[in-house]
Amino acid sequence: MMLLVADAIAAAVIENIRVRNTPERTRVVLDASAPLEHKVFTLPSTDQKPDRLVIDVPEAKLSFDTQAVDVGDGPILGLRTSQKSQSVRIVLDLDAPVRPRSFVLSPILNLNLSDRLVVDLYTKEQQSPVQRVERLTNQMRDVIVAIDAGHGGDDPGAIGPDKLYEKVVVFEIAQKMAQMFDDAPGFRALMIREGDYYLALRERTAKARKGRADIFLSIHADAFKTADAHGASVYAISEKGATSETARWLAEKENRADLIGGAGEVTLDDKDDLLVGVLLDLSITASLSQSLEMGGKVLSAIEPINRLHKKQVEQASFAVLKSPDIPSLLVETGYISNPREARRLATEQHQHRMAHAIFSGVRDYLSDNPPEGTWLAWKKSDMHVEALSYRIVSGDTLSGIADRHRISASRLREVNGLSGDLIRIGQVLKIPAS
């Protein structure tokens, strides 16, 4: 008898179930006489049954007629309950899959509220504030552009009239390009050579890989034995070069730890040579195709400001382009051995125009073909449309929201009519296109 009394005392009483549908979510609240232990899980639809959400509550009993619960016009089609021993099961029939989030709330004495179990349901079109922030954070990385100024240090490169050194000209152009990428939303520059020093060709590609670069740009100024040669050129690796590079990487087994997909992400130590060769061929073929298309964009951007040596992307076996998984271009900005082009390359104005042309071609290509997981890919996707408004959650700051959406805090204040940085939880901000 004492055991029965103890069981009765331990069981919490579910006194009511309330459902409220809002544009942000559907909230199901269980009012109870005591805190509710619970388990929530979903069941997918079958031929006979719709999607379902199950709420299991041990050590509980129902004290009201659940048929009177109004589920409204949200994703819940119907509500069923069952009592087995001292446990309650609540089944919600749904018109589509949902993502649940549950938590318990204690009574608030001055409001005469009981213990509550809250289950929030989010459809595909809805996401909780936490999920929305996580999604934006995870999917808004910058495209990393590795910019390699050729030569350097004891290697001056080509030398033009009046001792105009190639290493100096291309470093100036590279620096200007880097600033343009850093200023552009969704991009970040990685300077391979950051001063006047020499780097071996393999060191340059290795630094790009270590920095997880999405593309690699090598900047040069051409030279020829006669002064007549002129014009800018864009090169990608040749098919022959790609084939020989596959063989080299395959032979150097110590490099297998970071062959595919960026340094350290995929290990091929346990794969046989045939499989590794196939994977490398696929990787190089894909990056070569991207390089050729991107190179075409760069040529089109250069043509209005500088004569072209060739009107199509050329291919050659440059060692500096041979990073299997990174689309790479070598840009010859002109012939430093041609007095007329050398004079132009020596001017800051032409350096800026050349830097902007290369930047524009690459930017336009990547905007149309953004790497997966980047801010550019997010902006191009449907998720960008969803995020044109943002609801403030705990921990948000105006500057933090502005940074995540690649806009200035002043622009965010202007669009939302804010005089300062004060925001409140639940407030909805308009996010302008950057």
Image (cartoon, rainbow, N blue to C red):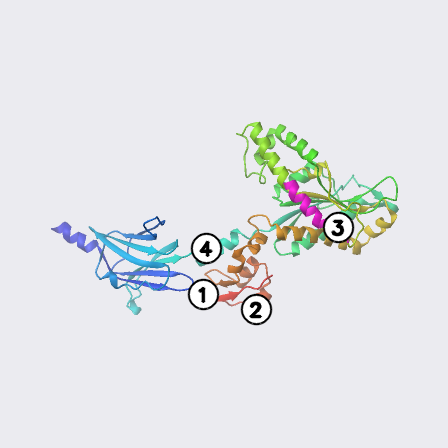
Q: Are marks 2 and 1 in contact (CB under 8 Å)?
A: no
Q: Which dot marks residue 415?
A: 2
**Residue that badge 4 annotates:** 131
Most frequent secondary structure within the magenta stretch: helix
Residue 14 x, y percent position in the rendering? 25, 59
Question: Nearer the N terminus, badge 1 or badge 4?
Answer: 4
Question: Which residue occupies 64% across, 29% down?
Answer: 247
Q: Is residue 289 magenta?
A: yes
Figure quadrant of the C terminus: bottom right
**Residue that badge 3 annotates:** 173
Q: Are marks 4 and 2 in contact (CB under 8 Å)?
A: no
Question: Which residue occupies 52% across, 55% down?
Answer: 136
Q: Which dot marks residue 426?
A: 1
Amino acid type, mark 4: Gln
Report how far apart the C-alphas of labels 1 and 3 lie in the structure: 47 Å
Report how far apart the C-alphas of labels 4 and 2 lie in the structure: 25 Å
Question: Which residue occupies 31% across, 65% down?
Answer: 108
The residue closer to the viewer here, 370 or 405, is: 370
Amino acid type, mark 2: Val
Report how far apart the C-alphas of labels 2 and 3 lie in the structure: 36 Å
User: Magenta region: which residues?
Assistant: 287-303
